[in-house]
Amino acid sequence: MARAANYEKLYRLTGYRFRNEKLLKNALTHSSYASEQKLSYEHNNERLEFIGDAFVDAAVGEELFRIMGTAHEGVLSRCRADVVCEDSLAEAAASMGLGEFLYLGRGEEASGGRGKTSILADAFEALIGAIILDGGYEAGKSVILKILGNRIRLGAEGKLNKDFKTRLQEKLQEKDHGVRIEYRKTAESGPDHSKTFTIELLVNGKTAGTGTGPSKAKAEQAAAEDALSKGV
């Protein structure tokens, strides 16, 4: 379970430091935990998710409008839907290891809640909502572009639904058909029903990206996404 001491890692991942850590804790608190602890509804992340959901839509839409020139409204809407859909936001949350920071009830913890798509996507939106309340719209937008920037660019190119490992392999092989790509497991933690894997991606023997996820396959995808976001 997340504790305040772990927040430093989250600050590094997002590039944002909270002034009011109570907002951050609320963003990371699932309703199952709040219910178990007999906390009132404003202490779970559902209200913050409401704010974050609207702002993620707006910020992603604005960025797509900026980079897609004269694209029609329908095209912009489809691209935004690809970027902000539940699966996409959950993948982004998993790639930054957001699941490890969540406060979950015992039942949700036991059923693998840290890796659940709906919980991760909701937590990401709640995190953005908390940042907006703590630091304002520009702070929230900065974090959205930091975490979702690569997905926004891929969405604009119509490539978001193509898996990251395939995209990375195709990109690297365009430059070098003999390139060596290796995914190496560097850590594995948690009980059998709720594992977290960390994968290091090596390109020609050099670290190009890292990723975490509830399975080796998802952690490998996260590592490939990390490498692509760095311009490998």
Image (cartoon, rainbow, N blue to C red):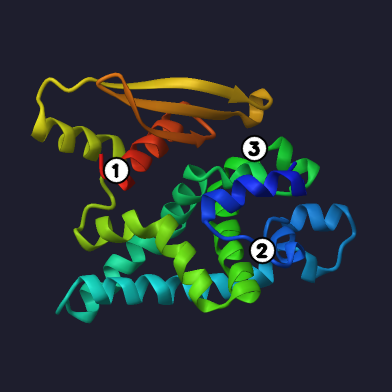
Q: Residue at x 45, y 27 (%)?
A: 199
Mark with earlier residue (3, 2) = 2
Mark 2 sits on what residue?
A: 18
- Tell which circle, 2 or 1, labels the residue nearer the N-terminal end: 2
Q: Which amino acid does label 2 sit on?
A: Phe
**Mark-to-mark CA distance, 2 and 1:** 28 Å
Work out which quarter of the rendered image holds the N terminus and state it.
Answer: top right
Work out whether residue 40 or residue 226 is closer to the camera in this orientation and state it. 226
Residue 222, percent from left and from top: 41, 39
Which residue is depicted at the point 23% across and 77% down?
74
Q: Identify the residue position indicated by label 3 in the image.
A: 112
Q: Tell me where residue 138 appears, x and y as whole percent.
A: 49, 75
Q: Residue 228 carries which label?
A: 1
Q: Is residue 219 above or below residue 121?
A: above
Name the foreground residue: 36 vs 221: 221
Q: In this view, does 30 lie to the left or right of 37?
A: left
Q: Residue at x 41, y 73 (%)?
A: 59
Q: Nearer the viewer, mark 1 or mark 3?
A: 1
Q: Quadrant of the C terminus?
A: top left
The picture places residue 65, in percent across and down from the top left corner, at 26, 76
Distance CA(mark 1)–CA(mark 3) = 28 Å
Q: Is residue 204 left or right of residue 141?
A: left
Quadrant for residue 190, please give it: top right
